Image: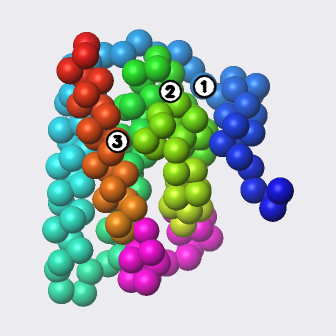
Amino acid sequence: MDGKETPQQVFQGIWNEKGYRPVEIDTTEVKQVLTMILEDYEFGKRLRHIENPNWRVIFNIHYDVIRELCDQLMRFKNLKTSNHQGLFAFIALNFNDLDDWEFFETIRTMRNKNKYMALDISKNMWQQVELRLDLNVSLISKQIKELLEGC
């Protein structure tokens, strides 16, 4: 192993620390939050095309969209967590179409380096994750909509 934790290891560690909490699904709230998240996403997409865009701001909007979508998706399994790595590990382990652990870890570490180590997000860094961010927003929002239809 190369020193990186697997999603199973992350999940188990956070589970053992009682970092996952039970939650009842409120489909009305999920629908409202989904609407707001997708509005944020559309706004973030528009920012990509302005003159001299700030790639850090654009990345952070998209990261928050992915994180919040995952949080809403996790609620369908009646759990929540405030730990981003634990959230992404849970999603990767419990939703087959969303098992891209490497991607989740890439964007999480980019975000943490930006927030806690003052690393700015360059256009090149943004371009390395842009397509996969868009793909995952589409996949996760589709999964949430399908689950809402079943409720």
| For residue 58, side relative to residue 111 (left or right) | left
**CA neighbours of label 3 inside 10 A, class few (<14), some (14 to 19), many (20+):** many
Mark count: 3
* Res. 80 mark: 2
**CA neighbours of label 2 inside 10 A, class few (<14), some (14 to 19), many (20+):** many
Q: Which residues are magenta?
A: 111-129
- Give residue 42's position: percent from left, percent from top: 18, 57
Amino acid bearing label 1: Tyr
Q: Please tell me which residue is depicted at 45% across the width and 75% down the height of the picture.
A: 128
Lower sequence index among marks 2 and 1: 1
Residue that mark 3 sits on: 140
Q: Secondary structure at mark 2?
A: strand
| For residue 72, side relative to residue 41 (left or right) | right
* Res. 47 mark: none
Q: Please tell me which residue is depicted at 26% across the width and 80% down the height of the picture.
A: 53
Question: Is residue 95 at all visible to an observer of this figure?
Answer: yes
For the C terminus, the quadrant is top left
- Give residue 143's position: percent from left, percent from top: 31, 34
For the N terminus, the quadrant is bottom right
Q: Please tell me which residue is depicted at 25% across the width and 44% down the height of the picture.
A: 37
The verdict on residue 149 being magenta is no
Real-space CA distance between mark 3 and mark 2, rounded to the nearest whole angstrom: 16 Å
Residue that mark 1 sits on: 20
Assess whether mark 1 and mark 2 are in contact (beta carbons under 8 angstroms): yes
